[in-house]
Amino acid sequence: MHTLQRIFDWKTYIFTVLAVISFSSFMVVLFGHTIPGIIIAFFKVAGEYVILGTVLIFAFSWFLRARPRNRPKNYRVVPIDVFGKQSTIQEIRTEFKTHDVAWSFMKQYKKTYPLHNFALVSDVKDSDKPTIFRYI
């Protein structure tokens, strides 16, 4: 009876049950709170850096596209007849300093002379031929 009492000693079972419960509680806290908390915190910070990097890349690309370019200093309006050949009309102004003014005059010329087409051209530094900016 003495050996049976040792096998079924209630102190041993209580110690074993307490050890299993405390270990399982430790595992629940570790895998349920600690590790997910670290991973969530990491991905929050990583997400912030991804968003910040995307904003910086967008701003840098916008800056590169928005920087001022070398614009021509003089523009010419070239009349073109119905046969597609360059012609001259004595009554019109053909030399302009700004693109907007030349474009405005060119639209008015198209209304006044409907049988002609007009090209807005300028000499660009890197090209040996005049560059056409607009054509109506």
Image (cartoon, rainbow, N blue to C red):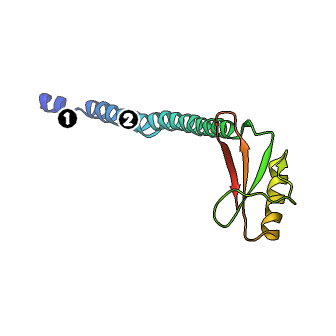
The label nearer to you, 1 versus 2, is 2
Q: Quadrant of the N terminus?
A: top left
Q: Nearer the viewer, residue 65 or 41?
A: 65
At 35% from the left and 37% from the top, the residue drawn is: 24
Task: Name the residue beneath numbered marker 1.
Answer: 8
Q: Nearer the viewer, residue 133 or 45?
A: 133
Cβ–Cβ under 8 Å for marks 1 and 2: no
Dot label at residue 86? none
At 72% from the left and 48% from the top, the residue drawn is: 121
Image coordinates of residue 94 in percent, x first then y, are: 82, 52
Dot label at residue 27? 2
Q: Nearer the viewer, residue 105 or 13?
A: 105
* SS class, disc 2: helix
Image-based side of 11 in relation to 115, left or right: left
Image-based side of 60 in relation to 33, left or right: right
Q: Quadrant of the C terminus?
A: bottom right
